[in-house]
Amino acid sequence: MLRVTSVQALSKCRLMVEMEDGRRGVFDMRPYLSSAFFRELEDEAYFGRVGLFFEGIGWPNGQDIGPDTIAAELQTVADAAA
């Protein structure tokens, strides 16, 4: 299983993520915000508190996304430029 090695909050509920295999790209959290579990992430200040959580990413109140989901939906930097 791959793991996330770095994460940085961007605008519009997006994240810049780097995976241990060197892939780097944008992960869009907007599709997840319809769930009550992730609704708190709409607050920009709270969204910015993202960090590494086990092999994936997470926030202080327990919201998290695993590395498999991130890897599957990651828009790599090369893809995002196209």
Image (tube, rainbow, N blue to C red):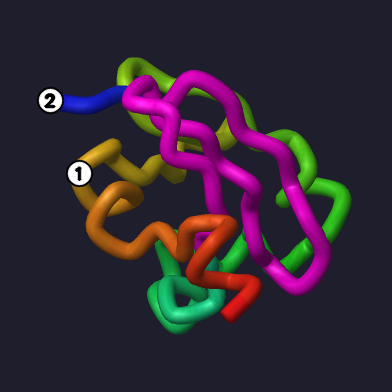
- Residue at x 51%, y 75% (from the top left corner): 33
In the rendering, at what x and y percent does residue 40 appear?
63, 60
In the rendering, at what x and y percent does residue 11 appear?
82, 65
Residue 14 covered by magenta stretch: yes
Quarter of the C terminus within the rendering: bottom right
Q: Please tell me whether residue 21 is drawn above or below residue 47 in the rendered image.
A: above
Tell me: 16 left or right of 46.
Answer: left
Q: CA distance from mark 1 to mark 2?
A: 7 Å
User: What main secondary structure does the magenta stretch of the protein show?
Assistant: strand
Q: Quadrant of residue 53?
A: top left
**Which region of the structure is painted magenta?**
4-27
- Which residue is nearer to you in this view: 34 or 31? 31
Disc ID at residue 15: none
In the rendering, at what x and y percent does residue 18 appear?
51, 33
The numbered mark, 1 or 2, whose residue comes first in the sequence reads 2
Q: Quadrant of residue 80?
A: bottom right
Tell me: 23 left or right of 55.
Answer: right
Q: How busy is the neighbourhood of tag 2: few (under 14 within 10 Å), some, or many (20 plus)?
A: few
- Which residue is nearer to you in this view: 10 or 53? 10
Residue 41 covered by magenta stretch: no
Q: For the residues labelled 1 and 2, say whether their Cβ atoms are less than 8 Å apart.
A: yes
**Which residue matches tag 1?**
68
- Residue at x 72%, y 50% (from the top left corner): 47
